Image (cartoon, coloured by chain):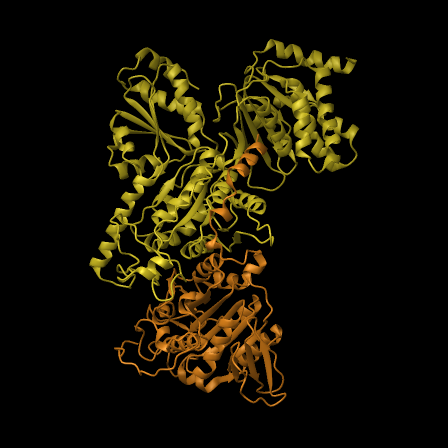
Amino acid sequence: MNTRAKQVRDKVVPDTEKRKSAGAVNDFVIRFANVNGTGSASANNLFAKAVFRMGIPVSPKNIFPSNIQGLPTWFEVRVSEKGYLGRRGGVDMLVAVNPQSQQQDLESLESGGYFFYDSTKPLSPALQRPDINYIGVPLTRICLDEYSDPRQRQLFRNVIYIGALAALLAIEFDVLKVLVGEQFKGKEKLIAPNMHALELGFQYTREHFDCPLAIRVERRDLVGDRILLEGNDALALGAIYGGATVAAWYPITPSTSVVDAFDKYARRLRIDPGSGDRKYAIAQAEDELAAIGIAIGAAWNGARAFTATSGPGVSLMSEFIGLAYFAEVPVVLFDIQRSGPSTGMPTRTQQSDIFAAAYASHGDTRHVLLFPSTPRECFDMAALSFDLADRLQTPIIVLSDLDLGMNDNLSAPLAWDDGRVYDRGKVFNQVQLEAMTERYGRYLDVDGDGICYRTYPGTHAEKGAYFTRGTSRDEYAIYTEDGDAYVRNMDRLLLKWETARTLVPAPELRDCGHKTSAGVIFFGSSAAACDEALELLADENLHLNSLRLRSFPFSDEVPAFIGRHEKVFVVEQNRDGQMRKLLIAECEIDPRQLLSVRHYNGMPITARNICRQIRQELGGAKVTRIDRKAVSKGYSERT
Amino acid sequence: MSYIRPHFRHPEQPVNDLGYTRRHYEGSLSTLCAGCGHDSVSAAIIQACFELSLPPHKIAKLSGIGCSSKTPTYFLGKSHGFNSVHGRMPSVATGANLANREMIYIGISGDGDTASIGLGQFAHVIRRGLNMLYLVANNGCYGLTKGQDSATADRGSVSRKGVPNPFEAIDLCTMALQTGASFVARGFSGDKAQLEPLIKAALCHKGFAFIDVISPCVTFNNTSRSSMGYEFVRDHIDATGKMDFVPLRQEISANYEPGSSQEITLHDGSVIHLYKKNGALHQHDRNQAIRNLQTHREQEQILTGLLYLDPDHCEFHDTLGTVKQPLRDLGEGDLCPGSRALEAINASLR
C-alpha cells in the first residue's frame, strides 16, 4: 500500500470502526444519487443485476425527475435476504456522486450508514455528520488521469464507482464481467474499456479501504427461476400474447414504455416471415382522445385493441370510455398511475386514479378494473383483459402505476398455456347470421346475462348490420328517446355488471393463522410492502388477516372478508382513501369499520410506514385476542 | 325530411352489377328539416354507391355529433354504422380501418364537428393518409343547438339570428390541402350532377379523400345575407370544370375532343375525365390548388369541383407496413408467439 493510500485509510477506517455499522449481510438499502442524463442508469442497473445474479433478492427503484438532463436523479436498491421487495425506508449506503443533492442525501442516511463520495475535492464541512462513515474515492481524478474524452470521463466515472462498490460490498467480480459481456453483446469493443473502468475502481478501493464492509453481499440461492422485469414490459408482452393487433397511444410518463415495449416485442414476434409485413399496427395519436378513439374504432371492427396512458390521459379519455360503456364496445386501457391531480408529480408514483377509472365519464357508468401487483400479474392480466373486454363488451382498465410499471421488479417467470384459445365473446359469424330466421337485435339479451350478441362489420351481405351509437336505443339498436327502452337498457347494463363480478379475478385471501379481529386490504404495487409489514407486525404479535384486491367489481368474498373482522385497514397510495371509499360505496360497508392507511408523497409506500399507521390504530384501541403488551411495545417503537 | 316512404316501388327498377336496386342502398327515413341540404348529400351517396355496385355490407359509415352526423342512419341501411362522440369520428375511423383494411370507410361530419371541436382530429387523420372518404356537410352553423355560427361561417355572413359573424372562417379544403390530403374536392348539395361523380371518384381513391359539401341549413342559415344560403351559393359558385367518373371495367363511350379533357387513372383502374373550363388544369399541383381557392375567395366566389388529386399517395397501412390480411381476421396462430418464445424471454431476464 502506498503512502497516500495509507493516509486515506488511516483517515477513514478508524471512523468506520468507531461507528456502529448499518445493515448486515444481504440486508441493506443503497441509494445512488446521480445527475440525470449522465449515463448513470446503465451502471446502476449493472449493480442491481449483479446482486440478482448472486442469487439474492433485490428490488431496484428509479427515482427520477421530469427532465432530460441536469437534475438530480436517484436509484435505490434494496437487497433483502428475506425477500422483501417493497421499499423499506431509510438508506444504509449513499453513493453521493451528485454535488447538487449531497446535503439532502446526507440527511436521508441512517445512523451508522456509509457516505460514499467523490474525494477529488475535499468534502464540504457542511456535509459532516458524526454518526456516519465516509468513504471517499477520487472518481474524477481517476477519470482525468485515465481518459481524455470528456464523454468517456463522464460515463466511466459511473462504472468506476460500481467497481469500488464491488470491492466494498463483496460483489463477485466474475459476475460483473459476465454482465458487461452481455450488455455489450454486438459492441464487443466496449467490453474491455468497461472492464478496465470497473477494475480501476475495484483496485483503488481494495488498496485504500478494509474491504468488504460490514454491509455486504454473499452468494445465496434465493432467487430461483424468478426474473427481473418492468411491469410495463410485462403488460406489453401480455398484449402480444393476448392477441392485441392495434395499439393507439399518446406519449405520457409513465405509460410510454408500455407501447415502446409492445413495439419492441412485436418487431420480434409479430412479423410475417414471408412478406416481412407486420401483424400489428401502432398509431401514435395526436392526443389521448384520439388514442382511445382509435382503440375503440378498431375494437368495434373486431380487432383486439388497447391504449396506454396515465391519469391526465384518463381524464381526457373519459367521454370515450362512457361511449364504449354505453355502446358496448370492448376496449382495453392500461393506466399507469402517477401523482395527480393535474400534472402533479409526473415522475412519481401513486394509486390515485381509482375513482377516475371506476366511474369514468358522465352519467351512470361503472368500469371493470384490474389491479396487478407484480410483472407476472401484469402479463396475466393484460392477456386476460382482452378476453374480458370481448366477453363483457365493455372497457377494461388495468390499473398499474409508475413504481410497478417503470422499475425492474423481481417476479415469477411469465407463463403461457399453448392450448389457450382467445375468448372472443358473443359474436355472430356469417354462418350463424345466415341460419337466423328471427330479426337480429344487437341489444337483445338472449342469454339473460346482460351480454348481447354483436356482429363485426362486413360479416353478412343482408343480415347483422346495426348502428352503434352513444345515444339511447332499443334492443334493435334503433334510436329512441322512449324512457322505458332507456331504463331496460340501463338495467341490462347493470345485469351485465353482475355477470362481470363472476368473471373477474378473485381476491387473494391470506389467513394469518391466529385468531384476530383485524384485517388488511391492499392492492397493486402496495402488495410487497404490505406483505413485509404483515410479517413485521406478526413479529410484534400483531396478527392481521389480509385480502389483496385484484379486480373491480368486488366479488362477494370482499364484503364477506370485511364482515369477518371488526376493523379492516385499507392500504393505498393516495390522499383521499379512494379504495376505502369505493369499498364503502360498492359493498355498503359501515365507514367506521374501514380504517385508512395512506401514503401519497410520490415515493413507493414502505413497510415501516404501514406498520406505524397500523400500530397507532391497534395500539390505541382494544383489539380482541391480541396481546396488549405486544401492542404497546409495537406502538412505542416509532419508525 | 320526415315523410312516409311509399312501400311500392317500380317493379322494373334498374339493378346494378350486384343485382341490387337503388333501394338496397337506402337507409331509414330522414328526420332532418324539409329541404335540408344534407338529405341531398345522402341521396348522392346512395346513388354513387349504387352506381359503383359497392356491396353495402363492405362499407362502414362513421360520424360524430350534429345534424350531418345523424345522416348515416338515412343511407346504406345494410352497412354497419358508428355514431361516435363530437368531433372524434376521425379517430374511430382510423381504428376501424386499422382493424380491417378491406372495407370502405365513409366518414360524415359537419362544420361544427370538423372545424371546431374536431379540428385536431381532422388535421391528423389527413396527416395519416387514412384510406377513407371524409365528407363534411358544411352549412356554417350549428343546427341542433339552434343556429349558432360555426367556424366555417364567413366573416360578415348573417344567419337567422341577424348578427353578422365577426370571426374569420376556416376553409376546410385549404386546410386539407395544407395537411396533405391526396384528394380534395368541394361540392354543393344543390348540384347533384357534380356531387355524384365527386363522391364516386373519392370512394375509388386509395388514400384520404376529402369533400367539403356546401349544404345550406334551411332553418337557421338560409337568409339573403348568409354566404351559405342557397341563393348566395347559386349566385357565386364557380366550378373547376365538369367531370365524368368512369369506373373500372366500364367502356368509355363518350367522345372527348382531343386536348379538351384530362384523364386521371385511379389506383383501382377507374378513370376521372376532367373538362377544362378556362385554361390549364392544375389538379396535380397542391400549391396551385390552394392559390385557386384563395383567389376565388377574394373575389367572393365559391370554387367547387375536384381541386386536387394525387392518385399515387401512400395510405396509412402502407406507411405502417401492416399485413395485407385484415388484422381482425388474424387468430392465435398468427398472434400468439407461444410458450417456447416466452421461455426464451424469461431466460433473457435472469
Residue at x 26%, y 63% (from the top left corner): A480
Residue closer to the observer: A113 or A43? A43
Image x and y of residue A573, in percent = 41, 33
Q: How many discs appear? A: 0
Query: Looking at the image, is B250 positioned above or below residue B90?
Result: below
Image x and y of residue A111, in percent = 54, 17
Image x and y of residue B14, in percent = 38, 82
Residue at x 57%, y 66% (from the top left corner): B180
Lateral position of residue B272 relative to residue A203, left or right: left
Query: Looking at the image, is A88 positioned above or below residue B322?
Result: above
Lateral position of residue A150 relative to residue B128, left or right: right
Lateral position of residue A52 relative to residue A376, left or right: right
Letter of the chain in yellow: A
Residue closer to the observer: B145 or A328? A328
Q: Colour of chain B?
A: orange
Q: For residue A53, what is the image quadrant? A: top right
Lateral position of residue A422 relative to residue A266, left or right: left
Q: Is residue A636 visible?
A: no
Query: Looking at the image, is A120 positioned above or below residue B19?
Result: above
Q: Is residue A437 visible?
A: yes
Q: Which quadrant is the N terminus of chain A positioned in?
A: top right
Q: For residue A613, what is the image quadrant? A: top left
Q: For residue B284, what is the image quadrant? A: bottom right
Residue at x 62%, y 14% (from the top left corner): A213
Residue closer to the observer: A225 or A543? A225
Q: Which quadrant is the C terminus of chain A positioned in?
A: top left
Image x and y of residue B276, in percent = 58, 86
